[in-house]
Image (tube, rainbow, N blue to C red):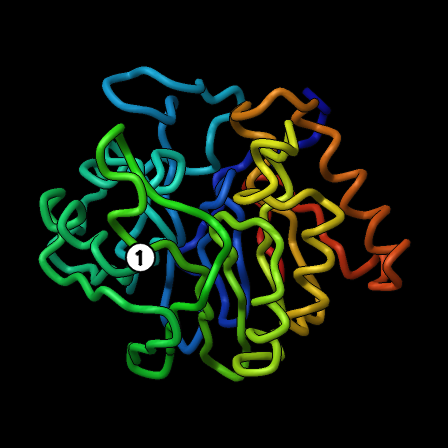
Amino acid sequence: MPEGLATGDKPDIATMPEGHVCWLGHAAFVMRLGGKLILTDPYLGDVAGPMGMGPRRFLPPALRADELPRLDCIVISHNHYDHIDTAALRAYRYRAETPVVCPLGVGTLLRRLGFPDVTELDWWETIALGSAEITALPAVHFSGRGPFDRNKTLWASMAISGGGKKIWFGGDTGYGAVFREIGERAGPFNLALVGIGAYEPRIIMEPSHATPEEAISIARDIRADRTVGMHWGSIMLTPENPFEAPERFVRAARDQQYGEANALVMKVGEVRAI
């Protein structure tokens, strides 16, 4: 494991200023936009799978679920185990007070976990949370938590905006022409949070996970000023070297004239201004 992948400190996200984002690890980010403290895809446990089976985490998250402050919203992109961590969500102390936004069909699971305020969105639908807004957007992926529910629920990327800033959260996605449409209809974005890991072998993963090079293409297509590479460095879902993605990501930003300085590689627990 590369030294310095994590800050080693527990971030104080409760006092995080407006227009900042913190990476908790994998696809879990906390951001403050429009005065709202928003968490994405909270995989904060040790295993990504049912009944303790599945890939085991080798780098802990910056915060565990029971350490989270009261959030203003939790945003879910789809129902895979490394994006909906049921044990973590049960351990979150403020389920009754915290609204959740998710794609169509995912709400049933979240209500069973004790979240009474759940809003399901189709692609291109928007919900307002005071001065913040969340819009479900297309992604190139699939859903399912077992052998009999494949694609029974929707998957999505999410636009999260407030306070004059707009973030695109990719969840999980492969590359596709739809991102140019997102850029035209929903862009531009100040920041894109894009998955750069779990991409080999391509014959299997191409329809659902982007390579680091395709992640830069996605950021360009959606008209994002800067992008953070996520979905790497916490668990090994596929056989590629789990630490090669950031180097390829930054190199691709240079090669595609996106700008190396605009391809950000954060540490787990790091807080940055958007």
Would you say residue 116 is visible in this rendering? yes
Dot 1, how many residues are within 10 Å of its Cα: few (below 14), some (14-19), or many (20+)? Answer: many
Would you say residue 66 is visible in this rendering? no
Task: Tell me what residue is drawn at x 21 percent, y 62 percent.
Answer: 99
Q: Is residue 71 left or right of residue 160?
A: left
Picture mark count: 1
Task: Tell me what residue is drawn at x 46 percent, y 48 percent.
Answer: 141
Measured as percent of width and height from the top left, residue 204 is found at 57, 32
Which one is nearer the viewer's eye here, 150 or 253? 150
Q: Is residue 58 left or right of residue 93?
A: right
Res 77 → quadrant? bottom left
Amino acid type, callout 1 = Ile
Task: Tell me what residue is drawn at x 26 percent, y 30 percent.
Answer: 146
Q: Is residue 107 left or right of residue 202?
A: left
Q: Which residue is mark 1?
A: 74
Measured as percent of width and height from the top left, residue 142 is found at 40, 46
Residue 130 vs 1, above or below: the answer is below
Residue at far front of view = 203
Residue 54 vs 163, above or below: the answer is above
Which one is nearer the viewer's eye here, 108 or 2? 108
Measured as percent of width and height from the top left, residue 178 is found at 56, 67
Which quadrant is home to the N terminus?
Answer: top right
Measured as percent of width and height from the top left, residue 60 is found at 48, 27
**Secondary-structure class at tag 1:** strand
Which one is nearer the viewer's eye here, 242 or 176? 176
Task: Tell me what residue is drawn at x 23 percent, y 18 percent.
Answer: 51
Which quadrant is home to the C terminus?
Answer: bottom right
Q: Is residue 241 left or right of residue 110?
A: right
